[in-house]
Amino acid sequence: MDELGVVPVASLRHERRIAADADIVWGVVRRPESIPDWFPGIVSCTVEGNRRVITTAIGLEIPEEILSNDDALRHFAYRITAPQYSFHLGVIDVFHIAPGDSLCVYSTTAMPDTLALLIAGGTLGALDEIQRLAEMSRVAS
Amino acid sequence: MSRKILFITTDQQRYDTVGANGGTLSRTPVLDRLAGEGIRYERAQPTSVVCMPSRASMLTGQFPSTHGAWMNGVPLAINAPSVAETLHDAGYATALIGKAHFEPFMDPFGLYAENSLANLGIPTIEQDWFDGRRGVHRGFDYLEFATHGVMGALHYAKWMREQHPDAIRGFYQVVDADLNVNAAGGGDTNAPQVKYNAVPREWYHTDWVADRTIRWLEEQGPDRDWFCWMSFPDPHHPWDPPKSEVGRVPWRDVPLPENYPQRASERESLLDQKARHWRLWYGGRLVSNYEAPAKWVPATMTGDQVREVNALNAVEVELIDEAIGRVLASIERKGWGDDVDVIFTSDHGELQGDFGLLFKGPYHVDGLMRLPLIWRPARTTALTPCVVHAPVSLVSLAATFLEIAGQSVPTWVEGAALPIDNDDASRRSFDATFTEWDSSIFGVDVHVRTVVTDDYLYTEYQPGTVHDGSEGELYVLSEDPLQRVNRFDDPAMAAVRASLAEQLAAHESRPGDRATPGVLMAPV
């Protein structure tokens, strides 16, 4: 917080062009309970309704609220609800480019800004895994 | 059997904090003795004035623009070259005990081995190596980590949580609720990052690092060659040494630094001679980097705060000196006293009140760039003790370790082994060192290149958020050892400036393969 009482917000967006149909990419991420499969460092999670609690590799338990999970738009949005974080919004969008060609965008908006940097760093690895799983799935199919 | 290597680093320690270098505030008899028996370098420079790029250069023998860990928070590629791998291949037992920081410390997902090993409870893990093989993490078969205080998932923090949980609250809280470097004051003067810590000395991380090093050394067979990097987190802020030790250096008796002008107008006049980000930070109008508290304004710092910070810094330096003495005694007890090379240095310096500033950042002056460097060769070498005057760089450490071990130096190493005396320095043309700064965080970009020669310290600022590429600094070291008079725009220095600019350009265009610059994953 600065002298005016303003806490800086940061938005960071990472994206990946993936050689797979958008529906295949969306299939990797659409199930909330699948996150340990594609987000490196998240080792387990529990999901009840729109509440998800993830556990990271260093033992952190982070509660989240799922805000949107839209198959038609291929849009997933969630926020961290742990009280020590002022604000967080994570959004995954999968866009159709062409058959066998899609764009996955993972954006993080958070306050304080340092938190956005920390989480967005993790989303880079997540995009690697989403790409690997989607392209592997494309080959398998 | 080859020569064994004890590599000792501290964090953020200035040249003038060591008695052998003329320091008077802290007593450092152990380092002074090593210097007297070995080689003391009068102008040792880092490749970067922040931890991660500088430490990565020690490990790889490469400049940050080559190894790719270009700022704090950018991990060194897991398959970057490592001198520890080469020593491991040569049969050395390899250990790193204390602060590593090749990988981001702020790591909520535990993506990096430095942050996951303590929980895994194993001495190392297998990773990809530079040459395509897999092997122990960065070439170390034993790793035990500590950093400043008791934060994070490192071994020391875990040990404190399990063994001495009640003592944890004695430490200064390094990061505030906004995950920024904490600006909160403490001590008698309300100086930032200061706290009198109730932790007993024997539980403090300095003694813990020494204790764990001694334990590892005791486990090595008598004929085993070893390379041990003992890495103390201090005297980096926070300045929260054990309260029981604070009386060693009463802060009210500490003189103000020679380079701390007492009148604000004089400080501001000096800062106005430098590139514009100096004064902007001093006045709280620009936070150019993460490493200093974002909510602290240097102009508010009082002389007494400088005295108290420097007193506590000196206490931490003394504790380190005594811890090194214990480790050296254990080496003597093992019968290795004549066979061990000891090299001591720090990753970068600390402003400690110079120009009215504290902490570190893109400020390439001696406070941050002139480092203690002592090499006490194994006594079996019978090398003559000396003082080397030529500028040398920490990029030379990797090649030095390899030469000690009798290994050929791989082509990926950029720095030649340290000179053993002035004739050697002259013969091998140790006449310039290069320091790099690149940062890009929260909308502020800063890019700095510096060359230091026997006579000059020359800095160019590349285009960034507050620099247009025309700024620079040029100091004549013999006339201006405190770097107060910027001669960059002095027409009388035009030829000197052109020559130094050529040296920087040659550094920038030097041959060799460069790693793809890493991605910023965290602020530190």
Image (cartoon, coloured by chain):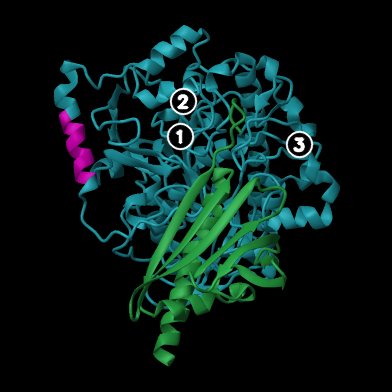
Q: What's the chain of the residue with tag 2?
A: B
Residue nearest the viewer, comparing B226 with B365: B365
Give the vertical position of B149 relative to A67 (above or below).
Answer: above
Residue B128 location (% of width, % of height): 45, 73
Which mark sits nearer the N-terminus, 1 or 2? 2
Percent position (x, y) of residue B15? 49, 32
In the rendered structure, are the residues bearing label 1 and label 2 in contact, judged by CB atoms less than 8 Å apart? Answer: yes
Name the side, left or right, on which B48 lies relative to B339.
left
Q: Which mark is residue B281?
A: 2
- Kind of element beneath mark 1: loop
Classify A103 as above or below A110: below
Q: Chain of mark 3?
A: B
Within 10 angstroms of label 2, few (less than 14), some, or many (20 or more) residues? many
In reply to whether residue B506 is colored magenta, the answer given is yes
Q: Quadrant of residue A98?
A: bottom left
Q: What amino acid is labelled 2 in the image? A: Trp
**Disc 1: host chain:** B
Which quadrant holds residue B154?
bottom right
Q: Is residue B221 something one can see in this rendering?
A: no
Q: Amino acid at mark 3?
A: Pro
- The colour of chain A is green
Please tell me which residue is depicted at 47% across the width and 19% down the height of the picture.
B355
Dot 2: element: helix
Residue identifier under label 1: B361
Residue found at the far front of this picture: A72
Q: Which residues are magenta?
A: B498-507
Q: Residue at x 40, y 43 (%)?
A: B439
Mark 1 and mark 2: span between their CA atoms?
Answer: 10 Å
